[in-house]
Amino acid sequence: MSTGLLAVRGGLVALVAVSAAAASQARTDSQPAGHPEASALFPKIAGWKISDGPTTYTPATLFEYIDGGAESFLQFDFQDLASATYANAGVGRDKNRRSSHAANAGDSTASAKTEVTVDIYRHKDAIRAFGMYTQERPAGTTPLPIGSEAYAGPDYLQLVVGSYYVKLVQLGSKQPSVLRWFAETVAAGLPGTHDIPAVLKCFPERGKRARAEKFMARDFLGHPFLHDAVAVPYQIGAVNFRLFIVEGKDSVDLRAMVKRYRAVAKSPDPGADSAAAEGSATVKDPLNGEVVLQWKGRWLWGAVDQPGPEAKALVDELGRRLSILAK
Amino acid sequence: MPGWKYSCRQVVMSKTTKNLERRDFLKLGAGGLAAGALSAGCATMTSSQPEKALSPEAAPPPKPAPAAGPAESAAKPVGPSRRVLGRTGIEVPIVSMGVMNADNPNLVRAALDGGILLLDTAHGYQEGRNEEMLGTVLPSRKRESFVLATKIHLSTLDRKTGLFAKGTRGEEIGEKLDISLKRLGLDHVDILHLHNQSARESVLYEPVLKALEKAKRDGKARFLGVSTHKNEPEVIRAAVEAKLYDVVLTSYNFKQDHHLEVQKAVGEAAQAGLGIVAMKTQAGVYWDGEKQHPINMKAALKWALRDPNVHTAIPGFTTLEQLQTDLEVLRDPTLTDDDKRSLEAPKLVGFFCQGCGECLDPCLAHLPIPDLMRSFMYAHAYRNREAAQALLLDLGLPEFPCGDCGECPVHCAKGFDVRQRVRDVVRLRAVPREFLL
């Protein structure tokens, strides 16, 4: 997934080109020049001390920490994980610390001690960190103004800042204010953008379900050739569907995706030639039913999940908003 | 995660559309699988007719455990594509679905329509989003049309020792199971696994056993299981010892150094009446860290299934193509000689030509072999076919390099099959640039 989904790069087709200055800034934001040492990621917090760690995991060892859950992180170009546990001053570390990955709403422990485990996952860039964050974000969360975005449960808080996806879990007593304090302190020390990916602003607001977008690094719609996508669910009246954007490495890559997709999916509406630099078509996907497609340059966008007239109108609007963004 | 949020529209998909999709799907290569897998008329395999598939190594092939345990049908094979999951009595297709990385409800639907029955997820997968995605698919289906297994991990499990902390509350299982059921939109799961066990003591830990038993007694789980991918033989034997578990979910693949020990423990458990589900059968997907040499997925899956004591396997898939591949194994799980050969570790000679030049003199066509090897590396290791083509075009090669030679006298010091690589890469010259991806 290139940084284009976060902020369009210079030299892009007119449809999605943004000013060179903006693109340059986004590149800087999404690719922090220096990655701090693991120990520098964990600030000193009054009244607390680090009782375990920091421990670092690499792509080769992440499985040791979160088992099969590592696979999703690797898809989003996981670079490394630094994990540390803080304990209240004077409280020793619980010997059976758990991974924040295991945290879920409703979890609780009988321990009277209070510990906070902070897992800082670093991805290749901001778009991938945000992408991984969206993989695990539940629906209906209330956003917290920490980093690019954050949400919390009774004993956990997850946030994303620049190329960092941070997961905090509280063991022992449940004190949301403590978790939030930790989160704000940790986020303040992390480099990188606090903006959400710019491409999300291209999706029309009407009917859009808030904070429900999801990035997919590969196998979008169940097809191995569709990569680097973001999909957003919509509901208009009783009608539900998704709008999506797929980003190719370049226009040649994008056209190849279109061509392969149309080889798999029948086209009741022949639409444009797949080899054309831009076009539209409606295809019959064997897995997903009718899918509306439009493409230009290295971008493919459309609607899936039984798109009706409302969805098709929004697909047109999505294209226009991409153009507006370009201007 | 979008998958579960926009499920409603998928549930209300018109019947006509669903049927059309199914036809499309079957045409794409899964044809006959659904019918074959679900048909009661499958060719019956009795215990006196062991499967032809053999272990690729010299060890004797595993033998099916005799029927034993509470259910008479336990461990009795019922056909090439279906086996009985131990004492549960559930007749399962030998290929099931590991749902962990799947986020497309339509893929789950296609799997179920294609003949898969058992879906394996876990409370913690994608922080719960995986169960929620399944919750968009399962409630609208007949309950008996699928078997749902989930796994619960206790927060007090020490990952290093595999032991539960002192004072671990078994109640956490019940609390998490209630959350899982809500996500799944079900009133019970078919199999509830104690997730990720690696020590006998934990498998037998009394507070946990009581909590599992309560879940079964309350009707929230029909059967109980334990999952393991470390110290598997110890865990499997502990599961037998506990006399509580009905199913074991274990890592089992051809690359495990101790696969013969796992095989032995699996046989003992099957004989005791436990259902055996194999996972991690694909053994990491690639032979090498550079991900240049993919493992033959079909062969790896067949390898696990050649053990008749393995009742089903749960390969994970996220694409239609992968589903089709797994369904092909469901149709024909025979481990062929070609399959066995493909599971032998390849000699990874790599891609990098050091330019020693020993190949130059012997080459009758006087080809710039080091440059050609570099082009091959660009194309296959770097996946930069544009660079590979550019280099080829600069070399001024004859129209048919290697074409006029009989036996190739070139022997590469690094072991490259020079002739094969040359013939492979020079074809790039004719590929239009816009197709070079």
Image (cartoon, helix red, strand yellow):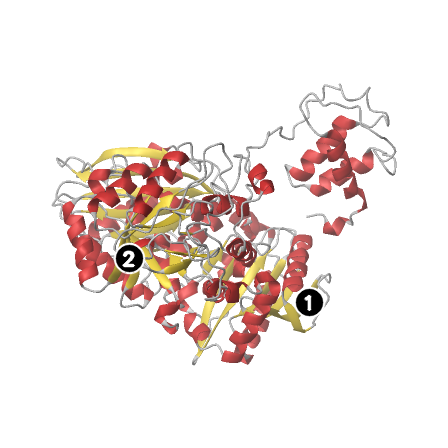
Q: Is residue B411 left or right of residue B110?
A: right
Circle 1/circle 2 CB separation < 8 Å: no
Instruction: Tell me: residue A315, above or below residue A327.
Output: below
**Quadrant that contains the C terminus of chain A:** bottom right
Q: Residues within 10 Å of mark 1 (few under 14, many from 20)?
A: some
Q: Which residue is mark 2?
A: B71
Badge 1 element? strand
The chain letter for the residue carrying disc 2 is: B
**Viewer-closest of B210 and B304:** B304
**Viewer-closest of B35 and A255:** B35
Q: Residues within 10 Å of mark 2 (few under 14, many from 20)?
A: some
Badge 2 element? loop
Say yes or no: labels 1 and 2 on the same chain.
Answer: no
Residue B347 badge: none
Which kind of residue does numbered mark 1 sit on? Gly
**Viewer-closest of B10 and A149:** B10
The chain letter for the residue carrying disc 1 is: A
Quote the CA–CA distance across marks 1 and 2: 61 Å
- Which numbered mark, 1 or 2, is in the foreground of this view? 2
Residue found at x 57% / y 59%: A246
Residue found at x 65% / y 61%: A258
Q: Is residue A136 visible?
A: yes
Instruction: Tell me: residue A197, above or below residue A286.
Output: above
Q: Which residue is mark 1?
A: A279
What x and y, as percent, mark residue A283? 62, 70
Which kind of residue does numbered mark 2 sit on? Ala
Residue furthest out toward the front: B48
What x and y, as percent, mark residue B342? 58, 39
Can you tell which quarter of the image residue B416 is in? top right
